[in-house]
Image (tube, rainbow, N blue to C red):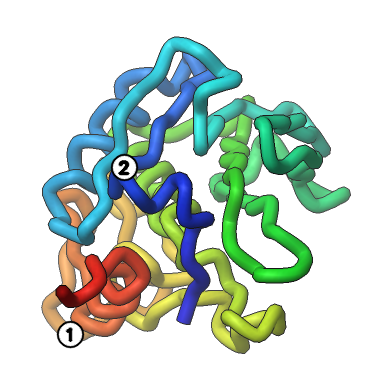
């Protein structure tokens, strides 16, 4: 499941994030901190320069796009045409090398006019960060993964609903409680760690 980032990014086992979603600053910070505690083999760090970012987070008030260019790649990450700013969801698009099918850039779009708690927003951002780290719904052969790299439990569940101040799976496992605190399944954890595993010497 998932695909790797381009080698010159993987070298540092770190992805830089530029946050354009100022209104979600607190949830984005908490999501970054939560991501880094998952021990996936890659860390997220903020950058204040968009051109140096591997991931850009933006609020969308409808269909939107983020332009990207570096010394090796250029392109545009777009939302789906029907992106709704008042529906509680997120979208992560990745720019991939058409030949090697590795990721060169990721854009995350958040709903610009949705009503939600900071904890609910944090869960959505963290979900999208996991897509951005490589669980982007694609496979190494360039075909789409049947489940979009979603899971039936935990943070990568594809359908979540509000519950109190947090979110819970639309069909939660017995005894499951709203997130946060974050739950991540062994399946998701293993898939992400495999993408960022260091070569054996």
Q: Earlier in the sequence, mark 2 or mark 1?
A: 2
Mark 2 falls on what kind of element?
strand
Q: Does residue 159 appear in the picture of this structure?
A: no
Q: Is residue 112 left or right of residue 175?
A: right
The residue labelled by disc 1 is: 174
Label 1 crowding class (10 Å Cα cut-off): few <14, some 14-19, many 20+?
Answer: few
Label 2 crowding class (10 Å Cα cut-off): few <14, some 14-19, many 20+?
Answer: some
Q: Residue at x 58, y 72 (%)?
A: 137
Is 41 located above or below residue 53 in the figure? below
- Specify the quadrant of the image occupied by residue 77: top right
Q: Nearer the viewer, residue 116 or 56?
A: 56
Tell me where residue 35 appears, x and y as whole percent: 24, 47
**Residue occupying the far front of the picture:** 201
- CA separation in Å, label 2 and label 1: 35 Å
Tell me where residue 89 appears, x and y as whole percent: 56, 49
The residue labelled by disc 2 is: 14
Q: Residue at x 52, y 55 (%)?
A: 6
Q: Is residue 146 left or right of residue 74?
A: left
Q: Nearer the viewer, residue 62 or 169?
A: 62
């Amino acid at each position: 499941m998932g695909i790797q980032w381009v080698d010159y990014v993987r070298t540092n086992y770190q992805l830089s994030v530029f946050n354009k979603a100022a209104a979600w600053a607190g949830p984005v910070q908490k999501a970054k901190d939560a991501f880094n505690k998952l021990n996936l083999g890659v860390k997220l760090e903020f950058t204040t320069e968009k051109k140096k970012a591997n991931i850009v987070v933006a609020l969308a008030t409808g269909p939107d796009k983020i332009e990207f260019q570096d010394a090796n790649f250029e392109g545009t990450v777009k939302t789906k045409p029907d992106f709704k700013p008042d529906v509680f969801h997120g979208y992560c698009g990745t720019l991939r090398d058409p030949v090697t099918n590795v990721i060169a850039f990721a854009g995350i779009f958040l709903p610009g006019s949705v009503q939600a708690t900071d904890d609910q927003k944090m869960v959505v951002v963290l979900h999208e960060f996991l897509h951005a780290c490589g669980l982007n719904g694609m496979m190494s052969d360039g075909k789409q993964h049947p489940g979009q790299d979603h899971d039936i439990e935990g943070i990568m569940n594809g359908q979540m609903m509000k519950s109190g101040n947090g979110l819970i799976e639309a069909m939660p496992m017995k005894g499951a409680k709203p997130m946060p605190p974050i739950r991540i399944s062994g399946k998701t954890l293993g898939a992400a760690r495999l993408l960022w595993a260091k070569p054996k010497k």
